Image (cartoon, rainbow, N blue to C red):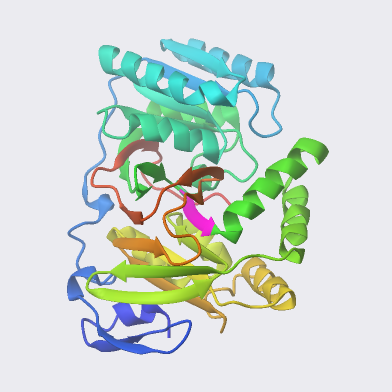
């Protein structure tokens, strides 16, 4: 039984499905994703944006398969037709993206403007990291390959349509995940998944950006030997030690629904969803990948899932205190453990449709 079912028991004694053997725990009713909405990010009302608020747009010139000049022209033309002040800063060096994001936030704060990210999920992550807690509204012009964040919030992937949405939308509170001091809007992970992302980026550099290339690179990664992590996970008053090739934490409704995790519904209650895989062979990993592609990963025997608001993850020997590879929204970095995953205290105020429908 997954923790999604556990959380719906209203605080009665339930079993946390372990990678080894089940342990009897008592679920805190305050963390019931079907009940208390006190910490839900969706409880705050949307806010209108002043009609003369300027837009400070940072565009990643290397995101997705779009023509940079064409996208710029579309943005400028649509903004000009509406008579809105705006600036477009194109970043061609990824190492300068964080600095460009901080600069855009400072300008938006000084002029009561809106910070806008034009790029894929990684670019949006960097911009959101700088914007969170600044008091500025946040907008998105999706330019990536998967665009999970934009699609789950009903933001059009067509550039002109997305710009027109910025001009009319209200700012809605959106839940932000954190691992230590880094934010994530879609997912964060350790172990095999960060390695898969690094391999995928290498394939993209050589063969181009497409979902097919991403699939092929994933298959190649699974063919290799992968190390098993020994992790100690502390959640509320419970502690669990497990062995797994990867720990994946999701904060995106569309992605979690696509792979078939019942815990996706808990995101609307201010929680995150976690997934860990039992130590299995290559063929079993391929089978799990196929189940994920068909939306059946959550109920697989070799998968452990649970919802939470905050967990502390500590690696056991041989990692010890060494830095671990951590992926946040497709970007890989190294962090010193322990790793604390949780929901940010403050939401991100996102410009999006009042009634959203995830874009398939």
In the rendering, at what x and y percent does residue 110 appear?
27, 12
Q: Main secondary structure of the magenta part?
A: strand
Q: Which residues are magenta?
A: 186-190
Please give the name of the residue rendered at 45% of the width and 58% of the height, measured from the top-left corner: 250
* Residue 55 image offset from top left, x and y in percent: 40, 18
- In the image, residue 241 above or below residue 93: below
Q: Nearer the viewer, residue 55 or 217?
A: 217
The residue depicted at 21 percent of the width and 46 percent of the height is 44
Residue 80 placement, left or right of 281: left
Answer with left or right where residue 209 lies relative to residue 171: right
Q: Specify the quadrant that holds the N terminus.
A: bottom left
Viewer-closest of 209 and 152: 209
Q: Is residue 272 visible?
A: no
Q: Residue at x 62, y 65 (%)?
A: 227
**234 w.r.t. 80: above or below:** below
Asked whether 189 falls inside the magenta stretch, the response is: yes
Q: Is residue 29 left or right of residue 296?
A: left
Residue 8: in magenta span: no
């Amino acid at each position: 039984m997954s923790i999604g079912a556990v959380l719906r028991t209203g605080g009665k004694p339930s079993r946390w499905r372990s990678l080894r053997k089940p342990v009897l725990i008592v679920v805190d009713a305050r963390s019931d994703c079907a009940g208390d909405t006190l910490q839900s990010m969706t409880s705050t009302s949307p806010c209108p944006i002043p009609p003369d608020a300027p837009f400070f747009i940072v565009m990643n010139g290397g995101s997705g398969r779009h023509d940079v000049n064409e996208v710029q022209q579309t943005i400028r033309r649509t903004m000009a037709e509406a008579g809105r002040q705006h600036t477009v800063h194109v970043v061609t060096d990824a190492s300068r993206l964080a600095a460009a994001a901080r600069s855009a936030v400072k300008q938006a704060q000084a002029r009561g403007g809106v910070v806008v990210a034009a790029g894929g999920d990684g670019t949006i992550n960097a911009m959101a990291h700088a914007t969170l807690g600044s008091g500025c509204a946040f907008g998105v012009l999706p330019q990536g390959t998967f665009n999970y964040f934009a699609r789950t919030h009903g933001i059009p992937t067509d550039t002109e349509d997305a710009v027109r949405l910025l001009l009319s939308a209200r700012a809605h509170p959106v839940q932000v995940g954190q691992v230590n001091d880094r934010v994530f809007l879609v997912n964060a992970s350790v172990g095999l998944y960060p390695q898969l992302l690094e391999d995928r980026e290498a394939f993209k550099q050589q063969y181009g950006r497409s979902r097919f290339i991403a699939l092929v690179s994933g298959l190649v990664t699974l063919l290799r030997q992968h190390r098993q992590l020994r992790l100690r996970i502390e959640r509320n008053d419970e502690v669990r030690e497990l062995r797994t090739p990867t720990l994946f934490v999701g904060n995106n409704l569309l992605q979690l629904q696509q792979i078939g995790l019942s815990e996706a519904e808990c995101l609307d209650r201010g929680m995150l969803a976690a997934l860990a895989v039992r130590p299995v062979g290559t063929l079993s990993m391929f089978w799990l990948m196929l189940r994920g592609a068909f939306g059946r990963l959550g109920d697989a025997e070799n998968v452990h899932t649970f919802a939470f608001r905050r967990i502390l993850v500590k690696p056991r020997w041989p990692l010890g205190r060494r830095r671990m590879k951590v992926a946040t929204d497709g970007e890989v970095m190294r962090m010193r453990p322990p790793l604390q995953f949780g929901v940010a205290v403050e939401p991100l105020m996102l410009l999006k449709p009042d009634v959203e429908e995830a874009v398939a």
